Image (cartoon, helix red, strand yellow):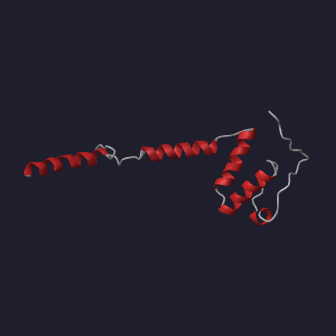
Amino acid sequence: MLPERKLIYHLQPRLFALSQRPVYPSSKPAKDWDKLEAEVKNKQEKDEKLDGDAAMNKFFSDIYSSADEDMRRAMNKSFAQSNGTVLSTNWKEVGTKKVESTMDMELKKWEY
């Protein structure tokens, strides 16, 4: 039984070592390159100048991502019920009534 224990002991440290990133000795403190890369990407995304529809989509996605549950519900309901012509963030107003389209558009069913 003693050789089996040694075999298990020798395999366990190797498995543990494979799950961690390799660390190399250095005279300087180690830099977290993944963190640095994420910071650079975030800064580039913030500094990026968008035009037209891309800017508008980013604006609305930023609002939606930072919104609470009621605001998201209001945005979804108002956009869906108005066929994409109204986007409200006030659930107290939108939750109690049907949202009407602000444009004079007529819905038509298309036959295939």
Residue 11 drawn at (x, y percent)? 20, 46
Q: Residue at x 64, y 57 (%)?
A: 66
**Quadrant of residue 33 within the rendered picture:** top left
Left or right for 44, reference 29: right
Residue 103 drawn at (x, y percent)? 89, 48
* Figure label count: 0
> Residue at the top extreme?
112
> Residue at the right extreme?
104
Q: Residue at x 46, y 47 (%)?
A: 35
> Residue at the front extreme?
112
Left or right for 43, reference 89: left
The image quadrant where one finds the C terminus is top right
Left or right for 40, reference 64: left
Which residue is more in the foreground, 40 or 83?
83
Which residue is more in the foreground, 56 or 98?
98
* Res. 26 in view: no
**Quadrant of residue 99 within the rendered picture:** bottom right
Residue 26 drawn at (x, y percent)? 30, 44
* Res. 1 in view: yes
Q: Residue at x 74, y 40 (%)?
A: 53
**Quadrant of residue 18 within the rendered picture:** top left
